[in-house]
């Protein structure tokens, strides 16, 4: 399946006339068993696509919430091998929901680019986001992923002009991830009015669906972005629920899934004039 799952998901949602809700969680946060339970339950809570963070010690694009999530996962013993194992376990229950592995190049290089692509595909990953890979240096990983049937998801930003977007999406497939704000995750808020023309521009140049992430924390903000984008990505708000649940001694899984449900409902109703 691999890339085909992503294409099928966007085709189905386009037919429904709505955007996708993309839920980001960190593999192994706060521990392997709880993380697996959360992952397995995301589709039922409303996630159309899942971004699964590959824990890394130096996540330079992330703000404090996701940094802390990575630290919790690493402290609990999560590894790249175990992350792929989580995907493999998920696939015994769900062969439809696309999973995007999101992280940084260092662990992939350590694994071996071709071996990682092969093993990720075998586990059931559909696409990969590597935040720190410049498009000019993406060919080796793009070639390996393409050979394995996986999409390389590239990121465009508010500072990317038309020429730069063309360079960025040259090897992209599946969808393009548009970073709605300058800076790291979980700090600023996305402005749908400002995002709308950028989404149209990236969509026109790439010919791919455009997912918008960074700066989306509330159902209201998610709904606003869902009216102009093909997908809405929420991450920091979800990993913060893990931290809050731990602090309050609550059921972390229920806390995260409750947040997913409210955000997914907002995204699903956004284009139909319903309140959130």
Image (spheres, rainbow, N blue to C red):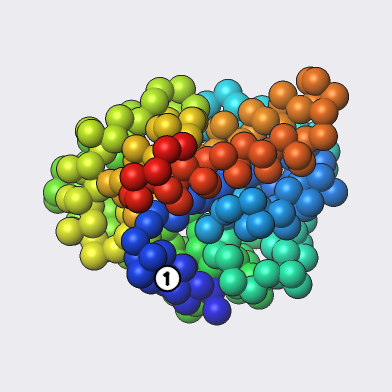
The answer to whether 78 appears left or right of 108 in the picture is right
The quarter of the picture where residue 70 lies is top right
**Residue at numbered disc 1:** 12
The image shows a total of numbered marks equal to 1
Depicted 203 relative to depicted 243: above or below:
below
Report whether residue 134 is seen.
no
- The spot of residue 45 in percent (x, y) is 64, 51
Residue in view at x 60 percent, y 43 percent: 260
Work out which residue is located at the far left of the displayed protein and give it: 162
The quarter of the picture where residue 24 lies is top right
Viewer-proximal residue among 268 and 239: 268
The quarter of the picture where residue 174 lies is bottom left
- The spot of residue 75 in percent (x, y) is 80, 34
> Circle 1: is it few (<14), some (14-19), or many (20+) Cα within 10 Å?
few
Residue in view at x 82 percent, y 34 percent: 251
Report whether residue 4 is seen.
yes
Residue in view at x 50 percent, y 63 percent: 127
Q: Quadrant of the N terminus?
A: bottom right
Residue in view at x 34 percent, y 40 percent: 225
- The spot of residue 263 in percent (x, y) is 52, 40
Depicted 176 relative to depicted 256: above or below:
below
Depicted 124 relative to depicted 274: above or below:
below
Q: Which secondary structure, mark 1?
A: helix
Viewer-proximal residue among 97 and 254: 254
The answer to whether 162 appears left or right of 231 in the picture is left
Viewer-proximal residue among 127 and 147: 127
- The spot of residue 194 in percent (x, y) is 22, 33
């Amino acid at each position: 399946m691999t890339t085909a799952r992503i294409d099928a998901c966007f085709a189905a949602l386009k037919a429904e006339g709505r955007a996708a809700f993309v839920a980001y969680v960190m593999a192994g946060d706060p521990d392997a068993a709880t993380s697996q339970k959360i992952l397995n339950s995301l589709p039922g809570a409303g996630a159309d696509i899942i971004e699964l963070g590959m824990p890394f010690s130096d996540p330079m694009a992330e703000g404090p919430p996701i940094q802390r999530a990575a630290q919790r996962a690493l402290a609990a013993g999560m590894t790249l091998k175990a992350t792929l194992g989580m995907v493999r376990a998920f696939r015994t229950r769900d062969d439809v929901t696309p999973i995007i592995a999101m992280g940084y190049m260092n662990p992939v290089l350590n694994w071996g680019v071709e071996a990682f692509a092969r093993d990720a595909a075998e586990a059931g990953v559909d696409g990969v986001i590597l935040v720190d890979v410049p498009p000019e240096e993406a060919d080796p990983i793009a070639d390996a992923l393409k050979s394995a049937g996986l999409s390389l998801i590239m990121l465009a930003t508010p500072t990317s002009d038309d020429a730069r977007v063309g360079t960025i999406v040259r090897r992209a497939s599946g969808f393009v991830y548009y970073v709605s704000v300058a800076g790291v995750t979980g700090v600023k808020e996305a402005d749908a009015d400002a995002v709308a023309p950028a989404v149209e521009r990236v969509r026109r140049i790439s010919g791919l669906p455009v997912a918008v992430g960074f700066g989306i924390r509330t159902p209201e903000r998610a709904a606003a972005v869902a009216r102009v984008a093909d997908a809405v990505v929420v991450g920091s708000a979800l990993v913060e629920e893990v931290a809050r649940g731990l602090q309050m001694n609550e059921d972390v899984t229920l806390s995260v899934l409750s947040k997913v449900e409210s955000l997914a409902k907002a995204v699903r109703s956004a284009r139909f004039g319903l309140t959130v």
